[in-house]
Amino acid sequence: MANQSAPPISVAPLPADDLAWLSMLLAAHPTAEMPEDMRPAIHDRLARIPFQTIIQAAETAGETRRPAVAQLYRWWIATVDPRAAHLFAAWFNAGVEMARLGHQAEAILAYRNSLVLRPDFHAAALNLGTLLEQIGQPEAALAAWNGALQPETVRTKLLNQQGRLLETMGRLDEAEKILRRSLAADPSQPDVIQHWVHLRQQMCDWPLLREDIPGLPPARMRRECGPLAILALTDRVAEQCEATGAWITQHTTAPGIRLAPAGGYRHARIRIGYLSSDFCRHAMSYLVAELFERHDRTRFEVYGYCASRDDGSDLRARVLGAFDHVRLVRDLSDEQAARRIREDEIDILVDLNGLTAGSRIQVLRYRPAPVQATYLGFIGPVPLPELDYVFCDAHVVPKDVARLYHPRPLYIAHNYQANDNRRVIGRVPTRAEIGLPENRFLFCCAARHYKITEEMFGAWMEILRRTGNTVLWLIDDNVWSRANLLAHAARLGVDPARLVFTGRADPAEYIARLTLADLFLDTFPYNTGTVASDALRMGVPMLTRSGESFASRMAGRLLLDIGAAEGVVESRDAYVETAVAFANEPRRLAAYRSRLGGGAWAASIGNVARFTIEYESTLISVISSISENAETKFDNASEMKSLDASG
């Protein structure tokens, strides 16, 4: 749901008498400077010119004369009767021009003047709030939108801006209520549906897909809930494809340009480019940092296309330092970024965002590389026509399910997940130090709460009811999810005191804390990925449930790789029974835990050297295949040419 601003008021072209004079005026004074002795004559003529002509002159002035255009509106305002019908519009257009020039204070004043003259002019309120937000005054922005008078037909625009900003500010409950009001007024808003559903997921506000919004049935909410929400709603690949495809259709466009040659290039080393907005302290970067470092530079030249904010972290410095070439594309348009990639003649472009926050998926629509793939950032189908592959393995996307995926699954290694052996691990605290009970069996789940479904939580509560001296340890994600989970536990007959929440920790401390758990309970249908790998790295026994989708099979792949098949089940009942057995049979759990120690993680999941070799071998095969196809086409063309000549 994008931040919105209203454009300047516009009209159709008008006769050119005064228009020619205004064009000459703007040409003579492009920076809004004029001699004092000219002002009276100019003001006198401006007073006789209709506002529609002023607009037409502004629209035809060109970008180099924007300062003069902004001043033209101010000159006209100063000459007309304060009761003039279009005065509010002149102030509004002056505000738009001032904002374009970066003169935020002047633009804010102009929008306020427009609203004084026309309190129900919602466009001025919309832009005023946007500017106030930009200068770091979110409360003032909310007040501007909330206090604006607006007709029913446009009320949703201001509600949506309030909801978006409240979500950004972390006021999830207020955002959810505002967006519910917007959907009640107009249920045909896919972007609003997406944010509203995901807000409810984050707060564990169940039942999730309610039936109390007229014109918005649960089936439509599911279809339009957006890419991230759908992974946590269902493990059916077809449903995930439908939701992600709808998002792609709505948020991307086919530019009608293909920048890269279909037959690829002929480089001495394969040029691989990684595109991401998460080259910072992000879970994805924790996985891939060592892969970047280990790439065989005799066969690969590695480019990083960084759309990330600079968080100043050591991890960001490490990731960017692992590339042979770094291109900062955060401030480039999608087309500019695509043309930058094309200039570098990248052989394989790997998008590491998919459909997550900060995605630059539109860049791929320009086809800046002959081979384009998505990996790690979004663990699901990304049916973008310009994508060739989703990188995975034969377990997370079994061959009998591969036909359901778009783009085509490419098995890059035995285990799809890259990892990093160089993670910093902090001191392991005692349970008491972080507020955990000392003498209780500790179930744990360190997933974000949007991954916790009502069915999953119900299974956890059944496990607690059927085990004695046990508690469930969760992260304290937000105050609303915590309150809802505690209330839901009570409704299911579990003492809320058996749920223990701890705050977030620094990455090194968080990974060390995991060792305090007796059994990690994974989420379904959206498994943990990086977190699952972290738990197994620390030797923590894990239980996961696998389904049909990639997202529901991630943790299962890791457990099978490390040799812990008893931690993988395929139904809710088996999940509950296995967890209860581990809690009630200490010897069984101890035997399970013993298989996770002694370097088991490093020899399997954490074997980055093996992964890199397998991964690079796959990429080489892909490039070789393209080259062979291109040569075959060339040979066929030559043969046809010879046949034509002999004719």
Image (cartoon, rainbow, N blue to C red):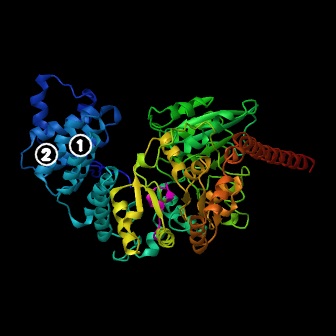
C-alpha gap between disc 1 and disc 2: 19 Å
Q: Position of residue 503 (x, y in %)?
A: 39, 49
Q: Position of residue 403 (x, y in %)?
A: 69, 65
Q: Residue 626 vs residue 554: left or right?
A: right
Considering the numbered disc 2 on the image, is that residue within a helix, a strand or a loop? Answer: helix
Residue placed under numbered mark 1 in the picture:
137
Q: Image quarter for residue 571? A: bottom right
* Residue 453 magenta: yes
Tell me the SS state at disc 1.
Answer: loop
Q: Give the mark nearer the N terminus: 1 vs 2.
A: 2
In the picture, which quadrant includes the N terminus?
bottom left
Nearest the viewer among 492 and 412 is: 492
Q: Quadrant of residue 478?
A: bottom left
Would you place residue 147 above or below residue 371 in this image?
Answer: below
Q: Residues within 10 Å of mark 1 (few under 14, many from 20)?
A: few
- Number of numbered discs visible in the structure rendering: 2
Residue bounds of the magenta highlight: 441-454
Please report the residue visible at 21 percent of the width from the left and 25 percent of the height from the top: 33
Relative vertical location of residue 43 with respect to residue 433 in this rendering, above or below: above
Residue at which label 2 appears: 113
Instruction: Locate residue 185 relative to residue 579 in the image: left or right.
Output: left
